[in-house]
Image (cartoon, grey):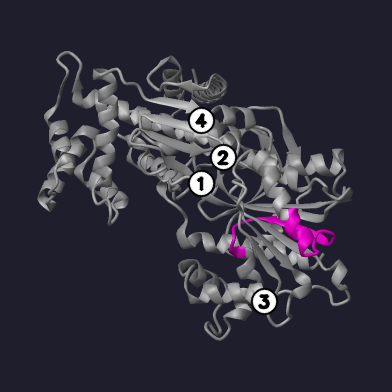
Amino acid sequence: MDAKTKETTRAQESTNAIERLYVTMRHLFNRGFYKPSGVSGNALKNALLVLRPEIYGSVAEEKGELNGLIYVLERLPEGIEQCRFINLTSDEGFSKSHLKPIIPPKRRRNCYRIDEEQMNIEITRGRSDIYDILTHLTFLFIESNKICERVFFEEDQSTVRDWDKLVAFVQSRKKTEHAREVALIHAANILGRTFEEVVEVHNKLSTEKQKDRFLEIIYWLGKLSIEEQTTGNKRTITFSPLLRESLGHHIHGERWAITVKEKMLELDLINRPIHIISANMHSVMNTLFARNALKDELPKTAPLDIYKTLSINKKEALQEKVLKVAAENGMVYIDDTSGANIDVQLFDTAKFNEAACCYAFPKTKDKASKPVIFVMDYAFGEQAFETIDELLKPYEVDGKKHFLDVHSISIMGKAGILDGKKGDLMIPSAHIFEGTADNYPFKNELCSADFEGYGLEVFEGTMVTVLGTSLQNKDILRFFYESTWNVIGLEMEGVHYQKAIQSASKIRKSIRKDIKVRYAYYASDNPLETGSTLASGGLGTAGVKPTYLITDKILEQLFNS
């Protein structure tokens, strides 16, 4: 068998593994519960081990996977490794209880520690959120079982010395620096990693309140897995009845869209020309106002350096001044309370002061024809369809329908790149949906020529919308890259956005047929390049240039339309 055939076979095996994962997850969701150590849980584990996603590194090897562990812990609630029962719920009113929400640093979802053994996770962003969580939990259970296999002897129900010493340290009240180092040595031996590697992860996870968080995580992962072997107390994942009933019905998306349109009607903006931009909550505002707002504080400073300064000092005086100027010039912030976790900024361009805004509309336009810039925070996977689909529906009040006059929808996002490096740009001409025959070609108002001469590589072609970034492996991606599909990158929302746009403009006819669309992505990772996956860390200030370059090009076209 030649190398090409072997590569194709591995890609096919990986594709089948992804299909098995999603079929199993949907079955378990419909069933209502599963046990990770049971038949269904093992089916998930085996499929993930066949797939060997790049983000999870050495998950299929005997040694512990450290970068993948950090990646997962940043997206799951703190303390989840201690919980035997994990319950996925809809928004069921926990916010009105005495329980304080736990919000993971890299995923905006409300989680509640019900008691010592149970964690509830609210699902308000659709199936993509469930897939994301279950995949991360499966990774944790695999790592947990690895620890158990290395430290526990089933024959006589005993444990190795390394484990006993780690347990003694975690349970001790007085922890000296010497004892900590010794415990890290034992942990390194348990995980099959070097002391240096373990110390690095220990330092990354350490906080002022939890100096030994890493060691405690290893302890709890091992403890629960060992107890499953010795006591028969199995960990269990459940899906609440309300979640199973509500999923797919756009409950949070509809609530979010109605709230936004109510505010637009209140401000007399709903019948104005509208330009929707899906982006973060700072780049559009800063690009519109920061250069003029900070001309005294940062004189003769290049725009990119201003944005870098603001990126580093998000909560300090400079950003506060930009916020104040934006509010004085027609910006209204809508803090999301729907559960969708998508905040909104409305910019009324009729209120822009020429001295404040860094762009200008043609002066002939009267107030009624001056557009509203509608900036919404990033959606997550299938949530993109839910939110845009609901937003583009007419808003009915007292028997009168208000059809939104949406002139353009611009999507800026992060994506994995297949030929290039972190920070490079991707301009799609079509989106294809992984694992289906669905494809969505469109005319992109942005093109590679718009970004030439800025020192970044620009790739133009097809983007794959994947079911979950945490499931990608090199074999599938290399197949996409080398195929005739001309795939340049992968992301999670493009198909869902475009499906909603085409549905509204061509089928429901609730918005204009000639709506303009703009898609541009900057590379957050290269999953084909070892050491450049999402688990290797974020872009830091390197992401400032592509973020603001894309934002500037979107606004340039918008103001000149």
| Count of numbered circles on the image | 4
Camera-near label (3 vs 4) is: 3
Q: Is residue 8 visible?
A: yes
Residue underneath mark 3 = 328
From the top left corner, tell me how far across and down residue 305 is, in percent.
52, 73
Residue drawn at point x = 17 percent, y = 35 percent: 167
Label 4 vs label 2: CA separation?
38 Å
Residue drawn at point x = 58 percent, y = 60 percent: 546
Residue underneath mark 1 = 95
Report the amino acid beneath label 3.
Glu
Q: Are marks 3 and 2 in contact (CB under 8 Å)?
A: no
Say if the magenta span includes residue 424. Answer: no
Which of the 4 image quarters holds residue 343?
Answer: bottom right
Q: Which structural element holds mark 2?
A: loop
Residue 91, numbered circle: 2
Of the image marks 1 and 4, the number of the one nearer the N terminus: 1
Of the image marks 4 and 2, the number of the one nearer the N terminus: 2
Q: Which structural element holds mark 1?
A: helix
Say if the magenta span includes residue 266. Answer: yes
Label 3 vs label 1: CA separation?
33 Å
From the top left corner, tell me how far across and down residue 350 is, in percent.
79, 72
Q: Are marks 1 and 2 in contact (CB under 8 Å)?
A: yes
Of the image marks 3 and 2, the number of the one nearer the N terminus: 2
Report the amino acid beneath label 1.
Ser
- Find the magenta span and give its range: 261-283
Residue drawn at point x = 10 percent, y = 50 percent: 178
Residue underneath mark 4 = 475
Which of the 4 image quarters holds residue 407?
Answer: bottom right
